[in-house]
Amino acid sequence: MTAVSAPPAAAAAGADTGPSTTTVLRSVAALLMGVTFFSIAAGALFTVLGLRLAAEMPALAGIVMSAYFVGLLVGSLTCARLIDAVGHIRAHAVFAAVAAVATLLHVFEPSLVSWTILRAITGYCMAGLFMTAESWLNEKATNRTRGRVMAVYLIANSGAFGLGPLIVNLGDPRGLEMFVVVAILLNVALVPVCMTRAGNPRLGHRSSFSMRRLIQASPLGIMGCLAEGLVNGAIYGMGSVYASQLGLSDSQVSLFFSSMLFGGLFLLFPIGTLSDRFDRRKVLLLLLLASAGLAVAIAVLGGRSFEGLLVLSFLIGGLIAPIYGLSVAQTNDYLSQDEFVAASGGLLLAYSLGASLGPLIAAGLMTAVGPYGLWAYVVVVLVALAGFVVYRMAMRAARPVHEQSLFVAVSETTPVSASLDPRSAEPDAPETPDPEMPSGAQRA
């Protein structure tokens, strides 16, 4: 996730005479409430499973955690057909119900095959939940409110995801209780959405963009998204396993994981502003080098002071989080406005492939050298990307700062979220004056 560092383009804002941001947010309040509940559940399940895997099959944890991101990727590519066929409310209910059942099935005797399948199913369902939420938001948002609606959505999503790990303090994460709590949260997420009066928007035509075209436009953009996926997948998937193997208590593991997630939320705004005022590649290079330094510090000092570990994890979470948004903006600098949405699908694919591989590679290193293998892996990925940034800076001159696209809130969940990007909004697009009535298909 990344954060809005500037308002949408002036042209888009000036052309929009639709409802205000407050009106739009009121119309999607129930939806945002549902997003909050299922994001808390997702964050809690990452932590609970990480603790269980660290205790029962640490060498195989990477396979199980990687399955979630594989399911998320497959879901982001295929869930649209089900949503279009049965409608958003029914599809949302199905995804939440199946995710709850998959969560409860974890209470049976754990095995590599069963937990891998269940984790993939959960990832698929989460992709469907995100897709229904994002397409609803896209339907309600106007060109003038698009950026702010996306920012509120991401704050609700990421903030709730950061709260999720703290749920483990309510009971024993190695018992039945936490899986029941997560299943309850997923079912509670159904209530506000199923009670909404909003219609069922069509997801519309989903255009594609070839990887070759993306690489030609911005090799750094697509490599940045891939690297961000490699790092985030490893940290999200193996962070709890690392903290548990370090000897932290369950409560400390939850605080460690939450601190990283909240760092990614709170440090984005100043970094986003910085990237709009200076050469974006130089900002990215500084972020990568600083993040690599923090990863080394965690590996060396993390086991000595829990308070110091929290500070370091907060900082590294905040510095790593903007990499995806900077990479998307870097790519958009070399595309036309009407190509932004199509290109986002390819960038998200690169991110998702990286996230699917990250836990596998990190788990292998952790098995070989211990828990610090996670941070050794993170350092290698970040330094490799930093080297590629230097190479690209030598190969092509930077765009003038005034010609750079803005660093805007973007989501790493499904391709539908790209339609909420205000950089892709068409200034003369018609908008509905009634926030409670669907306005028809939107680009996705």
Image: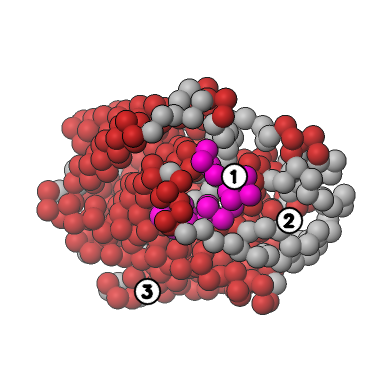
Residue that numbered label 3 is attached to: 117
Q: Residue at x 70, y 72 (%)?
A: 87
Magenta span of residues: 332-351
* Image mark for residue 139: 2
| Mark 1 closeness class: few <14, some 14–19, many ≥20 residues within 10 Å | few
Image x and y of residue 24, in percent: 77, 46
Principal secondary structure, stretch drawn in magenta? helix
SS of the residue under disc 3 = helix
**Residue 83 relative to residue 14: left or right:** left
Q: Residue at x 30, y 75 (%)?
A: 113
Q: CA distance from mark 2 to mark 1?
A: 23 Å
- The quadrant of the picture occupied by the C terminus is bottom right
**Residue 335 relative to residue 71: left or right:** right
**Residue 290 relative to residue 437: left or right:** left
Q: Is residue 225 above or below residue 109?
A: above
Residue that numbered label 1 is attached to: 336
SS of the residue under disc 1 = loop
Q: CA distance from mark 1 to mark 3?
A: 41 Å
Q: Nearer the viewer, mark 2 or mark 1?
A: 1
- Give the amino acid at mark 1: Ser
- Give the amino acid at mark 3: Ile
Taking the image as drawn, is residue 427 in sight? Answer: yes
Q: Residue at x 62, y 30 (%)?
A: 6
SS of the residue under disc 2 = helix
Residue closest to the eye, 208 or 181: 208
Q: Residue at x 30, y 38 (%)?
A: 388
Question: Within the image, what quadrant is residue 25 found in?
Answer: top right
